[in-house]
Image (tube, rainbow, N blue to C red):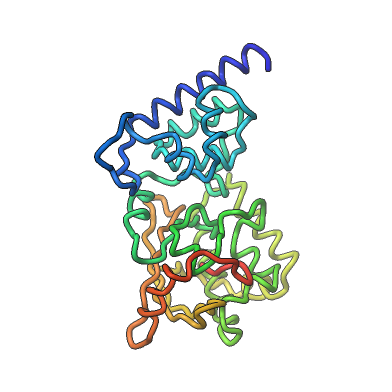
Amino acid sequence: MDPMGAAKYTELGAFLRSRRERVRPADVGLPTGPRRRVPGLRREEVAQLAGASVDYYNELERGAGSQPSEQMIAALARALRLSGDERDHLFHLAGRPVPVQGGAASHVHPGMLDLLHRLTSTPAQVITDLHVTLVQNPLAVALLGDQCGFRGPRASFVHRWFTEPEARLLYPEAEHETQSRAFVADLRAAVARRDATDTEARPMIRSLLALSPEFAALWADHEVAFRRDDRKRIDHPTLGVIEVNCLNLFSEDGRQRLLWFTPAVGTDSAALLELLAVVGTQEIAGPAPH
């Protein structure tokens, strides 16, 4: 490693350590405990929150190890509740370009993350306006599967919905047409809010028009409507069909949404959702809906 790179990695480690020491366990939904010898979070707690090994995170704080990926930097920014400026600084220190807002490595506002982690008894997740999943709580993973690992165009569930048949497995087939129409109307509303310099949404539309005749036909209808609340029937591989209300909280700029799922009144979904914590995270047959 060249001296300039080594100096930057040393600064990266110091910056991570300083941010870790200011975060209280209660800020990220962890128990405080009576005996803590360090201010803020422990290294192993940050590693757990970011989905990294403890050894790997220790190396980062020491200013050593390999260059962290964009996904790991984004995960660390969320774990440490960094502001937008702090998150961008972390990318610079790691020698990575700051991702455009809206992709899988997008910054999640700390306030929205805090609310997500306080929703411990209901499935919840944060997605972008293009239906890219940014972060999920454990119950959302148990209900919908891990949706944070897709990259490129496939990161958008809408793109997968129209290009990958297995993406539709968690909806009953009778509802596919309704869901397709709703996704397209929501996407048109989201694209309209972006300016002419947008480099993410419009290429996605061009790709879908070229790959999916179904999407092209629905896009030509010019329907527009944000999905603010929905009633969904999710076919869970273990628990069967679970009918839920899907509610949305939008960020100020409309680019991100906090979704949470509650049992539909008049169904047995409340008991089924309670079983999610028992069933836990498991491999889902196909990518999940939003």
Q: Nearer the viewer, residue 4 or 253?
A: 4
Residue at image x 54%, y 25%?
93
- In this image, 275 relative to 222: left or right? left
Q: Nearer the viewer, residue 63 or 210?
A: 63
Image quarter (top left, top right, bottom left or bottom right) of the N terminus: top right
Q: Position of residue 45 (x, y in %)?
A: 42, 40
Which residue is most to the front? 35
Q: Position of residue 24 (x, y in %)?
A: 30, 38
Quarter where residue 273 is shown: bottom left
Q: Position of residue 233 (x, y in %)?
A: 48, 80
Residue at image x 34%, y 47%?
30
Q: Position of residue 223 (x, y in %)?
A: 53, 73
Which residue is most to the left? 34
Q: Nearer the viewer, residue 222 or 80?
A: 80
Residue 131 against residue 100 in the figure, above or below: below
- In this image, 226 relative to 215: left or right? left
Residue at image x 38%, y 85%?
268
Quarter where residue 256 is shown: bottom left
Quarter where residue 262 is shown: bottom left
Which residue is most to the right? 210
Residue 241 against residue 258 in the figure, above or below: below
